[in-house]
Amino acid sequence: MPEPAVTVPESSSVEAQVPKKQAGPVFRIARGPVRWADERLGVAALLRPYFRKVFPDHWSFLLGEIALYSFIVLLLSGVFLCIWFKPSMAEVEYEGSYQLLHGLPMSEAFASTLALSFDIRGGLLLRQMHHWAAMLFVAAMLAHSLRIFFTGAFRKPREINWLLGVGLLALGIFEGFFGYSLPDDLLSGTGMRFFDGAVRATPVIGTWVEFFVFAGQFPGDLIIPRLYFLHILLIPALILALVAAHLALVFYHKHTQFPGPGRTEDSVVGYPVFPVYAAKAGGFFFIVFGVLTLMGALMQINPVWVVGPYNPAQVSAGSQPDWYMGFAEGAIRIMPGPGWEWHIGSTTWSWNVFIPLALPMTLLFVGMALYPFIEQWVTGDRSEHHLLDRPRNNPTRTGLGVAAMTWYAVLWAGGGNDLIATQFDVSLNAVTWVLRVAVFVAPVVAFLITKRVCIGLQRSDHDRLLHGAETGVIERDPSGRYSERHRPISVGEQYALTQQSEEYALLPAGDGDGEYRDRQLRLEQLRRRATRFYFVDTLHKPTRAELEEAAAHHHHGAGHEIGAGHGDGHGNGHGEDGAVIAGTESEHLAP
Amino acid sequence: MSEEDRDTGASPLLASHDHHGPELTDHDPAHYPVPDPGHPEHLPRLTDVDPKAADRATRQVAFFFGMVPLFAIGFAVVYFAVPGDWFFDFGPLRANARNLGLGVTFGLSLLFIGIGAVQWARTLMSDEEMVDLRHGATSKPEDQQWMLTELDKTVEESKLTRRKIIGRTLLAALGFVFVPMLVGLADLGPWPTKKKRAETIEKTLWAEGVRLVNDVTFAPIKADDIEIGQLVNGEPENLQDLHGAEFQIEKAKAAIVVVRMDPNTIQIPASREDWQVGGILCYSKICTHVGCPISLWEQQTHHLLCPCHQSTFDLGNSGVVIFGPAARSLPQLPITTDAEGYLVARSDFTVPVGPSYFERDSRQDYEEGDN
């Protein structure tokens, strides 16, 4: 089989490889500028390791790119909005071109948002692009983090990059929430009112935090300027710094890849940065940018003029935050109130607000941050992993991930309990009660189902490895038995299906294990129990001997009796094709 | 690929020329039962073997790129030529012509650059996959050793290990240098001391004799004008004297609902017998959960539902919570009528309105069963 081109020529041979006869027109044109830059910056040596750096290709690797590109669109559209937006809560009388609000008192922030929407050419487009890009930014980050989680890409040596990603997700959510609060329309003011009530409920320090954040009582006239500086300066700068570090680490570690023929732990297979990856990634940036622009043109978002300026005595039904705050909103909504507020002496402990706000956020972000270290502790695996796991091959991890997604989804549904009730014509109270139960039960059910599905998929992999793929060809042998002919899978697929690292459930350490001290022993017993939770019913891949035996079996007859268990169906199915393929494959399997 | 093949991707700073990271592949046949069949054979694309297909792909890419200037100029035309009050109507949908035109031209110009570039890469650029060797993130053991030795040496050279007082005072100095930075933030807002709270979040514009007015027209509310089952959103009359931030702050606390119910169908505790006027009761409109203005009134059940988080209060039973995340009853405002028959407050709220806070003394709030 031909080897792919290798991009690692010796430095001496490169010099030898640049004979004049190969020099194309670009070489002649670029020689001057490149030399000029090189003599000042040393660009040639600097770029040399990266110019043809290889990136593997897979659709799921684009999710992080979408996040990055929508962040760039946010920066660009944000600059335009900054030119016109006035982050001031000073009261003005509206005199713009939207007749329905004419003469109404409102903050300068809201008036300038209306100006952007109606009086500044392209303003509405940029506002809508900015809002859609924010939605996409968080959505892409979340989807990206799920991809990383389910494929085990957070494992050593990428734990730090996972932490950077968790930080980016948290920053992105708050950045979005603060941006949503800036226009000072009825909806964003309601969001701020919620924010005020929520910080105020923090035990012991709540009132102080409220007074410090709002410079006194809600709403005051400083919260929008303060959020503005957080939204356009502090948080974007932090995001930018984390993005830079995140990408630098991707570069340094080199991208992970899915297992497949020719792909090993110590190689990365894909396309070079120049020209293919640059064209694809650069092109994809323009596609994301273009799609967001079309969304800004064709899909209305946050029509602030419909709800009008903020009025602390008004709110509309169906008020909701942007989607990424939905899970926190849902937690707040489904929390029962009576009995969850303590009145001790002259103090009030507002657990009915504090718990649903602080607990899910903490669980989500701390849980995400700790997970790689927890899994590493359980497995005791200290080796590096550059080949991605297929989610089925770690059923417990995948189950935990789906459980977390289910929990998130239940909370998210809680954020729309009123809409569910009105749209489906059911009782709001019943919806809320169902969700109150589901938030505890549904993740467990999801975990169990997912784990079983994963193990089922592992079994089907097992079947493909040992018995081949089903062909759909039914044969009848002379004795009248029916069987389905199986075709061995390619050795490439066999290789891909057996690349996962294996972990084993451990028995408890016996009394005789004198090497542990008491505390260590308890910890080790806990770890071993955890390995049983993780791996006790994980299927292990077949051994080489089993594969060889299966191949030999194929060689003699690829039939499988219908309805009979595998392994005892020695039908007569000597299909020509099957026999030939089996023969070819078994040569590969011979050591 | 031989062992001599070098890493091209690692940082030159960290990967010296003879650097080989730890062995990454586990060649144990027990764990990896199928030997690597090697990279699959490269299959040519249609554009690699058919010059016509390649030419067609070239034309496609050039078409996408070539359209971009047209869209870009189209954007400029729309920007200058289309007035802001033109609208397109598509059945029930309505779109501003300028926003639509600007967005579609700009969006397509971006999209076509992207599609052209991706099509170029997919069909015409070499699609031979390449292999980079990968080495662990770890440095060589001797580098790690070097690092630790040097660290030890530099600390030794700084005399820090022998003159520990320097290290300790330096740590303290670096810790305390944050004190000015933190103290500088102490005036982010007024301090909510007991006195400050009493004059801010524990006080509203309501006082004895302040008229209840409609929250939009500021017209005083006459007791006789309210029918049974009717709910009116109100504010204190003196709110209209305020402006700007002060107006918003006071409005956020003083908002009320005035509601008339049949006195025979509701429970009025003895202590609140004189807080109402013939079944007309007045409650704070600000939810005791996180402070939304409660808006949804169920006339037949006397329930008031908050549209934000669906806390439900029973206005026929002193505002107790019957569902949802709120934990405390809605504060009730004691009212009476003045000489002209208008509703007036008898005092401020007897408990602080709005969401809970730590220093709030919640012993005075109405609880189910109180008298």
Image: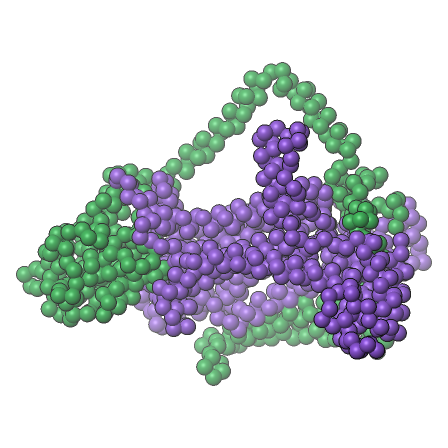
Chain colours: A purple, B green
User: Quick check: A294 left or right of B60?
Assistant: left
A453 over B159 or under it: above or below: below
Q: Quadrant of the N terminus of chain A?
A: bottom right
Residue A38 appearing in the image: no
Q: Residue at x 82, y 47 (%)?
A: B27
Q: Residue at x 42, y 62 (%)?
A: A434
Position in image of residue B45 (x %, y %): 82, 71
Q: Nearer the viewer, residue A562 or B109?
A: A562
User: Quick check: A122 left or right of A319?
Assistant: right
Number of on-image labels? 0
Residue lying farthest bottom? B91
Residue lying farthest front? A479
Residue lying farthest left? B339
Q: Nearer the viewer, residue A543 or B20?
A: A543
Position in image of residue A218 (x %, y %): 33, 51
User: Quick check: B324 left or right of B123?
Assistant: left
Residue B180 appearing in the image: yes
Position in image of residue B121 (x %, y %): 76, 66
Q: Residue at x 66, y 28 (%)?
A: A514
B332 over B13 or under it: above or below: below
Q: Nearer the viewer, residue A208 or B176?
A: A208
Q: Residue at x 49, y 59 (%)?
A: A442
User: Quick check: B176 left or right of B131?
Assistant: left
Position in image of residue A313 (x %, y %): 29, 60
Q: Nearer the viewer, residue A569 or A13?
A: A569
